[in-house]
Amino acid sequence: SVPAAPLHHNTSLLAALTEVEDALTSSVQTDDEFLTEVASHLIVAGGKRVRPLFSVAAAAVERPRIGDASRESVLGGVSVELVHIGSLYHDDVMDEAVIRRTVDSVNARWGNLRAILAGDFLLARASEIAASLGVEVAGLLAATIAKLCEGQVRELQSMFDVGRTEEAYLSSISGKTASLFASACRIGGIVADLDRDAIDAVTEFGQRYGMAFQMVDDVLDLTATEEQLGKPAGNDLVEGVYTLPVLRALELDGGEELRDLLGQPLEPAQIDRVRAI
Ligand code: GRG
């Protein structure tokens, strides 16, 4: 969750995040109560809301107070968060994940068919909101959804490959994670009418931050607890995904011991051994 202390010093940022919550809730209202319930599931469950925070902050870079956000930057952030949540619905179907944001995954609660449809619905609502912000934002969000898909396909093609290169890993996370952080910032910059250099600068920041964010996420899979993650820890390891920390450990280890351990179902003691490496 967002650290409490800075928010006390910044009531306008807190107000923007409250607006984000309200707009997220409104965005999934339909005449179909069941669809609204399924689509609300991970909104209600929480999440850090890092991406909308970046939209709001990017829109405020040339203003005296961070969080001096326009309604448009809040809506831009909401469109990005809806894409993020929709991608989590689909990702959990692909991974057969049962826990997300500390609660049942949507597929575990309602099955794959409804999880896929509700994910589609979230993407549609994200597109509607982006379109209300103009053609540039709408086009950017659509292009970003395409990048997430490209990144995820690249991920599928190399994640289980013992010969995975760091370039393959970086190319995958650039698409599946960093592109949405970059667009979160860029949309904030566009709706705040920043000049083109500033828009490019906040986009570059988002892209780099997103790369670092995914690398940390992959390290946390090895080092954090289920309580901290809101989902089971060590998942990547159990499934044999070659994330950056694993690739680096393979290098450090000289390869042999770790190479023998990986690529098969691991016992708890073996997981501890890999973590130690
Ligand atoms: C349908 C848009 C769409 C895409 C299809 C499934 C897919 C392709 C992409 C998934 C990509 C994916 C799940 C990347 C991982 C991103 C990531 C770091 C998730 C965790 O983000 P946090 O830590 O989670 O911000 P919270 O719960 O705090 O929001």
Image: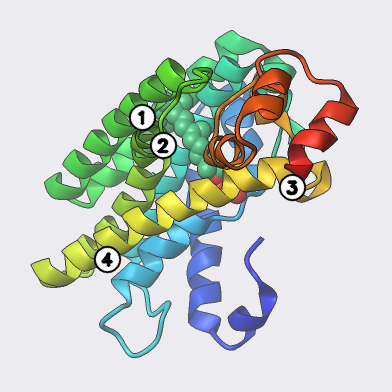
Residue neighbourhood size for the residue with mark 2, other residues' Cα within 10 Å, grouped as few (<14), some (14–19), many (≥20): some
Q: Is mark 2 within 8 Å of ligand 1?
A: no
What residue sits 68% from the left and 75% below the top? 4
Dot 1 beta carbon under 8 Å from ligand 1? yes
Nearer the N terminus, badge 3 or badge 2? 2
| Residue 150 seen in the figure | yes
Local crowd size for mark 3, using a 10 Å CA cut-off: few (<14), some (14–19), many (≥20): few
Depth-wise, is mark 2 or mark 4 nearer the camera?
2
Q: Earlier in the sequence, mark 2 or mark 4?
A: 2
Tag on residue 151?
A: 1
Q: Name the outermost residue toward the left.
A: 196
Establish if 108 lies above or below 5: above
Q: Is residue 21 above or below residue 26?
A: below
Q: Which residue is mark 4?
A: 202
Amino acid, disc 1: Gly
Dot 4: element: helix
Structural distance between the alpha carbons of marks 4 and 3: 30 Å
Q: Is residue 177 left or right of residue 270?
A: left
Q: Secondary structure at mark 2?
A: helix
Label 2 is placed on what type of residue?
Answer: Glu
CA distance separating discs 2 and 1: 14 Å
Q: Which residue does the numbered mark 2 point to in the structure image? A: 166
The amino acid type of the residue labelled 3 equals Thr
The amino acid sitting under disc 4 is Val
Given this view, does label 1 or label 3 mark the residue nearer the observer? 3
Foreground mark, 4 or 3?
Answer: 3
Q: CA distance from mark 3 to mark 2?
A: 20 Å
* Circle 3 SS class: helix
Q: How many marks?
A: 4
Whether tag 4 and tag 3 are in contact, CB under 8 A, the answer is no
